[in-house]
Each structure stands twice: as structure tokens, then as C-alpha cells.
Image (cartoon, rainbow, N blue to C red):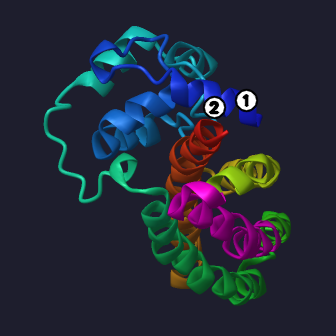
């Protein structure tokens, strides 16, 4: 997804009362995050990197009936009890929210993975040789995410916060923010593919019958990382980045 497409999405954001199977998946999430994300996770529909797909396309790819899914997503949307209305945050507030919640979680959790993998491999490699491939994928995920977050915190996020702080800075930064956003979104695609491979290799994070407690904890942790990262990427791809591009366009 390039910068111009993101800007077009933000300008043409639909009225939430008119959501249809032709609406984008991310628009349903924007309408009622808690309710919609729970259903999308249950149906295994990607709402972060795949958030710009129409609901009809996303359902068709999963062999689901778009109309039935639409009814589920639109049910009980009046009960919006999420603690933070992310779309109402300023750019600076959204950056701080992402860093303090999602980056902090990953910075604490990712360093644990290597030790967990080694313990599980040592105890279970004989009966589960697929663990060797799993370790490669898990380490690749760590290698992708850690420098990615650093680039965001040191380069892109300060640019966005400066743009948010003053119109003068916004005018100066708008032409340069598109490139970093494209790079970050490409990184998100790579992370999404790694998470999908990990999910498939672990049979949806289902530990085998002979799994020890460490084995179970590893799979639980990997599932939590997937869930958190999907939400993390959704907030950046569908809220932070489009609004940053939109503000930059308005400043020109």
C-alpha cells in the first residue's frame, strides 16, 4: 500500500452507518474495535496488513459467506466499551500509546524467545523435529521486529510528532514522511508473513499431547505476540500512518 492509496482511503473514509460487504475491513474495526477484532480473530480474517481489503474479498479468500459475516460484525455495535477510542487520539498521543503499550510489550517479550526455544528443543526435538524450523522463524521475527521498532522510535515517530506539533514543521516534513511510512508498511508485510508461517507450523498454537509446561508456555507466548502485533500493526497501518499522510497533504 503506497502513500497515495493511504491518503485516498483517509479522505474517502465511509460513514460507519453505511458499512457493507464492499467496505474495507479496517472500517469495521474503526467502528467498534473490541467487538469486531474478536470476531475477525475467530474467523482468522487479517485486519492489520489486510485491513484495506473489502470484507467481501477477505471472506471469499477464507471461504466464508460475506453477508453472514457482515451481520456478525454489525451486531451489538452500540455497546462500545473499549477503553481508548484510538481514532480520536492526536498523532502524538497515538504514537505514545503505541510505544508505551505495544513496543514495550515486544521489548520485554522478544528477548525471552531464544531461551524458551532452546529449552523446548532440548527436551522435545526427538519427537518434534519441526521445532528447529520453528526456532528459525521465531528468531527471524525477532530480528525483523526489534530494528523495525527502533527505526520507528528514532526516525518516523519523531517526524510525525513534529508534524503534529506545528503547522510550520508539518509543511517541512510532509514530503519526507511518505518514504519512511512505505518502508514501515513493507516491514509489516514481512512480519505478517512470518506470523502466518509460525501459526501454521504450530497448528494454530496448539501444543502436542506430550508438551511440557515450558512447551505450552512457549506456544501461549507466541499466540499472544501474534495477537498483540496484529493490533499494533492495525493501529499504525490504518490509523497513524493514514492520518499522518492526510495532515501532510493538508499542509501543502
Residue 114, given in percent of the width and then of the height, sits at 74, 85
Residue at 51%, 20% in the rendered image? 12
The reply, left or right, for residue 130 in relation to residue 96 is right
The reply, left or right, for residue 110 in relation to residue 209 is right
Furthest residue to the front? 168
CB within 8 Å, label 2 to label 1:
yes
Structural distance between the alpha carbons of marks 2 and 1: 5 Å
The reply, left or right, for residue 96 in relation to residue 9 is left
User: Quick one: 66 or 171, which is closer to the camera?
Assistant: 171
Residue at 54%, 51% in the rendered image? 240
The quarter of the displayed image where residue 246 is located:
top right
Residue at 42%, 56% in the rendered image? 90
Mark 2 surroundings within 10 Å by alpha-carbon count, few (fewer than 14), some (14 through 19), many (20 or more): many
User: Quick one: 35 or 221, which is closer to the camera?
Assistant: 35
Report whether residue 207 is seen: no
SS label for mark 1: helix
- Say if 21 sits above or below 246 in the image: above
Residue 210, given in percent of the width and then of the height, sits at 58, 72
Q: Magenta residues?
A: 141-169
Residue 53, given in percent of the width and then of the height, sits at 60, 24
Asked if the magenta segment contains residue 145, the reply would be yes
The quarter of the displayed image where residue 129 is located:
bottom right
Asked if the magenta segment contains residue 192, the reply would be no
* Figure quadrant of the C terminus: top right
Residue 72, given in percent of the width and then of the height, sits at 29, 24
Report whether residue 94 is seen: yes
- Say if 232 sits above or below 143 in the image: above
User: Quick one: 247 or 143, which is closer to the camera?
Assistant: 247
Please give the label number shown on residue 7: 2
- Say if 228 sits above or below 86 in the image: below
Residue identified by numbered label 1: 4
Amino acid at each position: 500500500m503506497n502513500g497515495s492509496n493511504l491518503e485516498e482511503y483517509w479522505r474517502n473514509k465511509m460513514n460507519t452507518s453505511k458499512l457493507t460487504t464492499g467496505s474495507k475491513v479496517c472500517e469495521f474495526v474503526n467502528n467498534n474495535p473490541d467487538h469486531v477484532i474478536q470476531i475477525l480473530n475467530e474467523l482468522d480474517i487479517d485486519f492489520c496488513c489486510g485491513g484495506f481489503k473489502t470484507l467481501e474479498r477477505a471472506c471469499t479468500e477464507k471461504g466464508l459467506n460475506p453477508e453472514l459475516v457482515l451481520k456478525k460484525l454489525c451486531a451489538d455495535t452500540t455497546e462500545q466499551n473499549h477503553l481508548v477510542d484510538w481514532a480520536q487520539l492526536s498523532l502524538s498521543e497515538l504514537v505514545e500509546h503505541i510505544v508505551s503499550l505495544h513496543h514495550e510489550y515486544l521489548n520485554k517479550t522478544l528477548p525471552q524467545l531464544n531461551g524458551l526455544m532452546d529449552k523446548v528443543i532440548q527436551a522435545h526435538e526427538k519427537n518434534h523435529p519441526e521445532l528447529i524450523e520453528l526456532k528459525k522463524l521465531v528468531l527471524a521475527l525477532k530480528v525483523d521486529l526489534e530494528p523495525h521498532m527502533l527505526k520507528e522510535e528514532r526516525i518516523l515517530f519523531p517526524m510525525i510528532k513534529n508534524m503534529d506539533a506545528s503547522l510550520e514543521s508539518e509543511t517541512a516534513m510532509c514530503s519526507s514522511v511518505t518514504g519512511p511510512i512505505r518502508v514501515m508498511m513493507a516491514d509489516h508485510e514481512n512480519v505478517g508473513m512470518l506470523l502466518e508461517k509460525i501459526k501454521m507450523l504450530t497448528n494454530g498454537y496448539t501444543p502436542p499431547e506430550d508438551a511440557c509446561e515450558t512447551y505450552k508456555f512457549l506456544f501461549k507466548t507466541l499466540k499472544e505476540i501474534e495477537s498483540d502485533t496484529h493490533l499494533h500493526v492495525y493501529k499504525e497501518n490504518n490509523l497513524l500512518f493514514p492520518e499522518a499522510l492526510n495532515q501532510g497533504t493538508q499542509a501543502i
